[in-house]
Image (cartoon, rainbow, N blue to C red):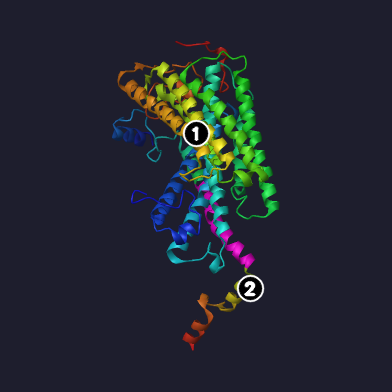
């Protein structure tokens, strides 16, 4: 491994002026472990952000579902359990 | 917006933005969406950096208060910005495909848009004011040559502002027909935001108390910030009061209030930071006398512009109107005159900063004798900031070991 590191450093030509490092290590991290932890945490924070993103959409859905329960129940009558989102009447007539 | 602008105002309220407006609402909406994600990614970057990439010895309670403030800002960016992004998306569905989420004729609710809009857009104000607050903490400690008073209180008040900021949005809807009970709750919570803001203001004042005040340009801007932010904050309490808000809603009083926070607070803090970090950013020192002159001009011009607007608003002049009765003439003239002074105050830094880049004296690594890692490296900083990994051994604002004044 030390040979590989030296080779890597030579490939860089020491152009950015620091010591040899692992080829996967990005320049702004000190160690591979730190790089791994940082990218993991970053992904988790991004997922939290996604919760808020779709949260806005789900909040709007929830409100209308609470305000108009009868519309939802009538709508569900039109749905086929097997075919999911497909409209009941058109699906069954197509099948027949 | 280049293609003829958008006539909905910055709030994009429905139904105007979905049904009446013929301008480029969609293009601007896409712009908001993309900018929103850029803001979110900045927040993710800052949070991960603070959590995972602190230097050895840099514990949480050794962090500069600017970093605490940026951390609180990132929190708001991550939790708030996605909501405006999805709201703009729903607006696009409504406008482009006629979904009816906000259209009462199709069973929708236009007030829902206002709720979703302000759920982000109120915290957005804290995104703008928190980083300048962090800068103020840095500058006050440096130019009072003292450790900050109540470090942990200042740090946690940033987080408290970020958290409280999420539960006050409906104070923008007091006259939009929300229930009186929720209005009372939101009024109370809006008053609560004053607590962490006041904690900061008192701690900054206490830091200056018995300090060795060093009269330099950044400190002049800090004094401006303190005065204007105080007025802006206190008039916010007027607006958070339910009865008063019915009278003051949509008047010049509101305009004056948020300019005292956003321009008097955020922009003054930004300028304090610019004058403080300019020698670090460019390696050159600017003309300090002109810096002080600019700070004074901005302060005077700002008050002349916006203080008359408090009176105008109280007298009942609404926002977004160009015509007014003759008895309001004098305040409008004062306001326009103030805007001219303000413009000169803002143009001066453009001139002396530009001059300093070419002809300014070399600033050296640490012209202010400040604590903090950024002042240990060269100006302007190297790529990757430090030649070797720095190790932190002391608290953030330990000015006791420093000379009282430097060159």
> Could one spot residue B56 in this view of the protein?
no
Give the quadrant of residue B238.
Answer: top right
For the magenta stretch, what is the residue range?
A43-67
Q: Which residue is mark 1?
A: B330
* Left or right of residue B238, residue B294 in this image: left
Few, some or many residues within 10 Å of mark 2 (<14, 14–19, 20+): few
Q: Is residue A78 magenta?
A: no
Q: Which residue is mark 2?
A: A70
Which residue lies at the image location 46% right of the left edge and 60% below the top edge?
A: B18
Which residue of the protein is positioned furthest toward the front in this rendering? Answer: B326
**Disc 1 is attached to a residue of which chain?**
B
Q: Position of residue B243 (x, y in %)?
A: 67, 45
Q: Position of residue B99 (x, y in %)?
A: 49, 66
> Could one spot residue B228 in this view of the protein?
yes
Few, some or many residues within 10 Å of mark 1 (<14, 14–19, 20+): few
- Classify B284 as above or below B85: above
**Disc 2 is attached to a residue of which chain?**
A
- Classify B337 as above or below B114: above
Nearest the camera: B279 or B399?
A: B279
Q: Position of residue B404 (x, y in %)?
A: 53, 11
Residues marked 1 and 2, same chain: no
Q: SS class of the residue under badge 1?
A: helix
Which label is found at residue B222? none
Q: CA distance from mark 1 to mark 2?
A: 59 Å
Q: SS class of the residue under badge 2?
A: helix
Q: Position of residue B45 (x, y in %)?
A: 47, 40
Which residue lies at the image location 60% right of the left edge and 34% below the top edge?
A: B233
Would you say the residues marked 1 and 2 are in contact, meaning their CB atoms lie under 8 Å apart?
no
């Amino acid at each position: 491994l030390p040979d590989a590191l030296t080779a890597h450093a030579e490939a860089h030509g020491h152009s950015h002026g620091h010591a040899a490092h692992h080829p996967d290590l990005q320049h702004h991290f000190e160690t591979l472990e730190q790089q791994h932890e940082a990218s993991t945490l970053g992904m988790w924070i991004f997922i939290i952000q996604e919760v808020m993103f779709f949260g806005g959409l789900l909040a709007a859905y929830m409100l209308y579902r609470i305000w108009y329960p009868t519309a939802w129940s009538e709508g569900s009558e039109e749905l086929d359990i097997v075919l999911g989102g497909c409209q009941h009447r058109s699906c069954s007539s197509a099948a027949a | 917006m280049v293609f003829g602008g958008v006539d909905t105002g910055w709030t994009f309220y429905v139904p105007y933005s979905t049904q009446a407006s013929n301008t480029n609402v969609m293009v601007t909406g896409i712009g908001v969406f993309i900018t929103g994600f850029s803001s979110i990614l900045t927040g993710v970057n800052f949070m991960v950096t603070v959590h995972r990439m602190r230097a050895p010895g840099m514990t949480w309670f050794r962090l500069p208060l600017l970093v605490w403030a940026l951390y609180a800002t990132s929190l708001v960016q991550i939790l708030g910005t996605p909501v405006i992004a999805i709201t703009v998306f729903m607006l696009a569905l409504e406008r482009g495909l006629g979904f009816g989420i906000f259209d009462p004729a199709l069973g929708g609710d236009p007030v829902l848009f206002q709720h979703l809009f302000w759920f982000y857009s109120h915290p957005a104000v804290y995104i703008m004011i928190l980083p300048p607050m962090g800068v103020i903490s840095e500058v006050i400690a440096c130019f009072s040559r003292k450790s900050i008073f109540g470090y942990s209180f200042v740090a946690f008040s940033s987080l408290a502002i970020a958290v409280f900021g999420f539960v006050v949005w409906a104070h923008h809807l007091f006259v939009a027909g929300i229930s009186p009970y929720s209005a009372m709750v939101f009024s109370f919570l809006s008053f609560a935001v004053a607590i962490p803001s006041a904690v900061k203001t008192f701690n900054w004042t206490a830091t200056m108390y018995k300090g060795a005040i060093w009269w330099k340009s950044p400190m002049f801007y800090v004094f401006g910030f303190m005065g204007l932010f105080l007025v802006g904050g206190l008039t916010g309490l007027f607006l958070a009061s339910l009865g008063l808000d019915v009278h003051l809603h949509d008047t010049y009083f509101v305009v004056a209030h948020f300019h005292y926070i956003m321009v008097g607070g955020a922009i003054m803090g930004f300028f304090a930071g610019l004058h403080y970090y300019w020698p670090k950013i460019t390696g050159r020192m600017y003309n300090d006398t002109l810096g002080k002159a600019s700070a004074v001009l901005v302060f005077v011009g700002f008050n002349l512009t916006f203080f008359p607007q408090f009176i105008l608003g109280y007298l009942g002049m609404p926002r977004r109107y160009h015509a007014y009765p003759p008895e309001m003439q004098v305040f409008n003239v004062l306001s326009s005159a103030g805007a001219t002074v303000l413009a000169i105050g803002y143009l001066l830094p453009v001139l002396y900063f530009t001059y300093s880049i070419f002809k300014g004296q070399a600033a050296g690594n640490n012209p202010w004798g400040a604590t903090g890692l950024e002042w240990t490296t060269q100006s302007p900083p190297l790529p990757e900031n430090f030649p070797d990994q720095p190790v932190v051994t002391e608290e953030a604002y330990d000015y006791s070991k420093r000379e009282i004044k430097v060159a």
